Amino acid sequence: MKSGLEDVVAAETVLSDVDGTNGRLIMRGVSLDDLAHSSFEDVAALLLDGFVAMPHDVQTALGAARQAVFATIASAGDLTALAPVDALRALLARLGDSDDAETALRLLAAPGVFTPAILRQRQGLAPIAPDASLSQAADALRVLHGEVPSAEQEAALNRYLVTVADHGLNASTFAARVVASTQAGLASSVLAALSALKGPLHGGAPGPVLDMLDAAGTPAGADGWVRQALDGGDRLMGFGHRVYRVRDPRADALKSAVAMLTKAGAIDPARLALAEAVETAALTQLRARKPDRVLETNVEFYTALLLEALGFPREAFTCVFAMGRVTGWIAHAREQAATGRLIRPMSVYVGPKVKDAA
Ligand code: ACO
């Protein structure tokens, strides 16, 4: 029995390849280095090709899907008692569970519409209707803040969405495939995936990364804080990965977007310096304490700085992750439905034996 299914191959996929030894991520034959400069719409078309009947003009179709999704918000009522990710689950569950292309597009569009609306409702503000002519990244920021973002802000969110669009058989994608294998609908797969994503060992880490920066306080305080956290048995959020045995290539894709935002004045250089000091202290301590295990910076570390700079509150970071990763979930669910069988592994019974009748 392999606890955590480590190294167990559970699916064949044409969607993405996570090369943990060489630190490379490939989506449908294109490396992240090249994809990072593409639009979210182009990457969605690439990943969904052959699995969802995609329209020729993806940006316009996605814009129309955003408007259709927005129309469902008014009847949803007050969701402020729920954490943002739970409110997102509630709103997604109302979209219907069909398997058609229209539902797929709506699910793809939905986190970018619902997340800003959820955040605005928590501030007592009305939701803003989508502008179908904008890109997914620009419109998500516009309906959050009420103004069209700068070119740098749009590019940074686009970079993030593309970078996290798919990533092999991670926990949430596996959850999506398990549900798809039962022939439940597409929304059910997406909901299962989102529920897996919210945990701090998966997509819930970047919020706590900012808590960690707050706790460290200053670059000079980084080393002491990291030592204390590790002495207390804590895991450092934003470090380590099940598959990568080198630095997560997504961390570099996002670090360059963070550098661009810093140059544009959207990130205080002091904030970046604090993050770099915490990263250096964490890597130094992790190498010293776990010499047999490579624990490098993962995608979540620079995600935290990037999403903070774009004005997303930390409690909503998992929802923003879902804006990008929903692409992979839909593609994997459709691939599983098209090519896979019911996923039904075995367990080993280690409970008490049946007592023989006297
Ligand atoms: N900080 C401190 N110690 C760590 C960390 C960390 N971030 N990551 C792993 N370790 C330690 C473990 O405690 C363990 O030590 P032990 O052998 O003495 O018990 C050893 O390294 C191996 O860890 P595993 O649990 O086997 O690693 P696993 O592959 O199961 O976990 C995971 C990977 C969950 C990402 C882990 O590294 C972690 O908890 N990281 C922090 C949370 C995080 O950043 N999550 C986001 C991941 S990226 C994503 O999902 C999008």
Image (cartoon, rainbow, N blue to C red):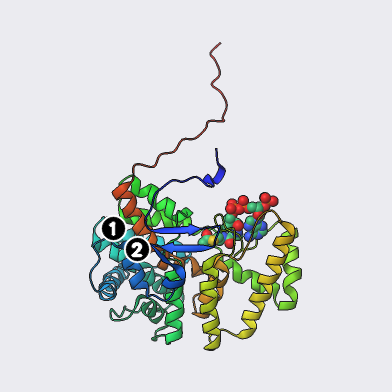
Q: Is residue 164 above or below residue 233?
A: below
Asked where in the image residue 231 lies, by quadrant, the reply is bottom right
Ligand 1 found in image quarter: bottom right
User: At 74% from the left edge and 70% from the top edge, which residue is drawn?
Assistant: 223
Quadrant of the rendered structure where residue 286 is? bottom right
Q: Residues within 10 Å of mark 1 (few under 14, many from 20)?
A: some
Helix, strand, or loop for circle 1?
A: loop
What amino acid does circle 1 point to? Phe
Residue that label 1 marks: 51
| Mark 2 residue element | helix
Q: In the depicted view, which residue is nearer to us: 30 or 104?
A: 30
- In this rendering, the count of numbered labels is 2
Cα gap from disc 2 to disc 1, whole angstroms:
8 Å
**Numbered mark located on residue 47 in the image:** 2
- Disc 2 + disc 1, Cβ < 8 Å: yes
Q: Nearer the viewer, residue 236 or 211?
A: 236
Look at 59% across and 61% down and name the residue there.
246
Depth order, front residue of 307/15: 15
Answer above or below: position of 221 versus 172.
Answer: below
Q: Which mark is residue 19?
A: none
Residue 17: horizontal and vertical position, in percent? Answer: 44, 58
